[in-house]
Image: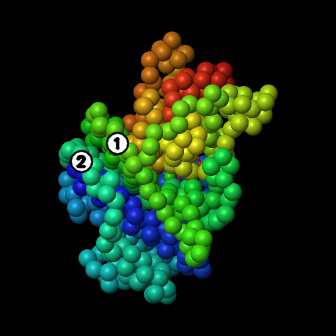
Amino acid sequence: MAGLLQALVGVSEKAAHIARLCRHEEPLFQLLVAEKTGPDRNRRFLQDFKTLADVLIQEVIKHDLGKEFPELQGHIHGEESNEFRNAQGETVTVRVCATPGDTAALLLSVLEPERAAAELLAAAVHRDVALGDAELAGAALSIPPQDLAVWIDPIDSTNEYIGGREDVAPRGGIAPGGLSSALVLIGAYDRHTGCPVLGVINEPFFRRDPLTRRWQGRYHWGVAYGDTRLCSLSPPPPPRPAPRLVLSRAEGGPVRAALGPLCGGRDGDGDGLRFAAGAGYKMLCVILGLADAYVLSEGSTFAWDACAPHCHPAGPGGGVVALAGALRARQAGDTGPPPELVYNRPAEGAAGAERWANWGGLVAYAHPQHLEAVLAALATVPGL
Ligand code: 2IP
Ligand code: CA
């Protein structure tokens, strides 16, 4: 079963390569955006974009994993639908074909007349990825793939990916926005329990080569299966006395005011708070120890945003819980650990992407005492 973990990492590397390739073709990139409409629209953004890179990456991941692990076929889901509207208004179903030539021909029906770009992308789709990663190769696991299903977020933080700001200065190691917050997320969960099991977080735009100025990536993987906890990263640092919290830039005033003093802000000015783009990126900040917790008060993230990061043990007592549920439990006097998010239960009465929203917000945290402090601070915020 180390095979599946290696396959997830391998396909995330292929995906990251495609994400970089599409950004390098700047004039073409503008042609690749199409507006999301109908039930697939993210409620937050009036204009949300999916890109050909998004759709193509998801199909590559589905194709490669399904080919190597037939037991997973029909259980690999993603954020995107594989329908793409071309400039003529025709709908093209993007998929990986049998040969690079066939894939290039299909892509050309979207990219016409950019033949060279279609061929470049098709070559990236069909290339073999070799991983020289001894630690990953040595990870011995026995997790039956027939018990698993997969969530893919081909590019998390699509808006930052499209915006493409290259040199956003980090604050305390946390980038407030820009390309580095665009991630590829692939998470496998237990089909029966919905618990996260194996996950890869790939950062296609981790840093730029100082000589060539080309982007270089890196990846992280994590396993949480029964008593097995493995991670490519070292455990996060011990808890800071005042937690460092990272929030969405869209988080509202009352939540900022309630949390600000907790992390060292003066008189609720929120000075100790950090803001960043991308649900996956904010969870990664917690996993890397750059923040102690990511707090989100709204249902604006989805199963595919959270599943892969959730597989990375952020700390011995860390986790990812539903905020509204945890607040209700504390209000009812329940002091036990709040239930973790699960990934196999669609929301009743919701349609399209909304079925998989993490309704009521979430808290991703490394240390239980910080979770408790956050819940206590938010207990008095009206409407939560
Ligand atoms: C988005 C993306 C946004 C995030 C939102 C996600 O996914 O990560 O950045 O909002 O919750 O669903 P915010 O940046 O305010 O945290 P995608 O880009 O894949 O649609
Ligand atoms: Ca996302």
Q: What secondary structure is found at the residue carrying circle 2?
A: loop
| Label ID, residue 230 | 1
Q: Is residue 261 left or right of residue 353?
A: right
| Label ID, residue 151 | none
Q: Is residue 77 left or right of residue 296?
A: left
Q: Residues within 10 Å of mark 2 (few under 14, many from 20)?
A: few
- Residue 280 in sight here: yes
Identify the residue at horizontal 60%, vertical 27% (top origin): 374
Residue 51, given in percent of the width and then of the height, sits at 51, 67
Q: Is residue 132 left or right of residue 141?
A: right
- Residue 75 in sight here: no
Check mark 2 vs ligand 2: CB closer than 8 Å? yes or no: no
Residue 280, given in percent of the width and then of the height, sits at 51, 49
Identify the residue at horizontal 51%, vertical 29% (top origin): 367
Amino acid type, callout 1: Leu
Amino acid type, callout 2: Ala
Residue 183, given in percent of the width and then of the height, sits at 50, 57
Which of the 4 quarters of the picture holds residue 270?
A: top right
Identify the residue at horizontal 56%, vertical 73% (top origin): 214
Q: Earlier in the sequence, mark 1 or mark 2?
A: 2
The relative height of residue 184 versus residue 323 in the rendered view (above or below) is below
| Label ID, residue 140 | 2
Q: CA distance from mark 1 to mark 2?
A: 10 Å
Residue 13, given in percent of the width and then of the height, sits at 40, 64
Q: What secondary structure is found at the residue carrying circle 1?
A: strand
Check mark 1 vs ligand 2: CB closer than 8 Å? yes or no: no
Q: Is residue 263 left or right of residue 286?
A: right
Q: Could you tell me which quadrant the C terminus lies in?
A: top right
The relative height of residue 70 versus residue 30 in the rendered view (above or below) is above
- The residue nearer to you, when weighing 59 against 183, is 183
Identify the residue at horizontal 54%, vertical 50% (top origin): 281
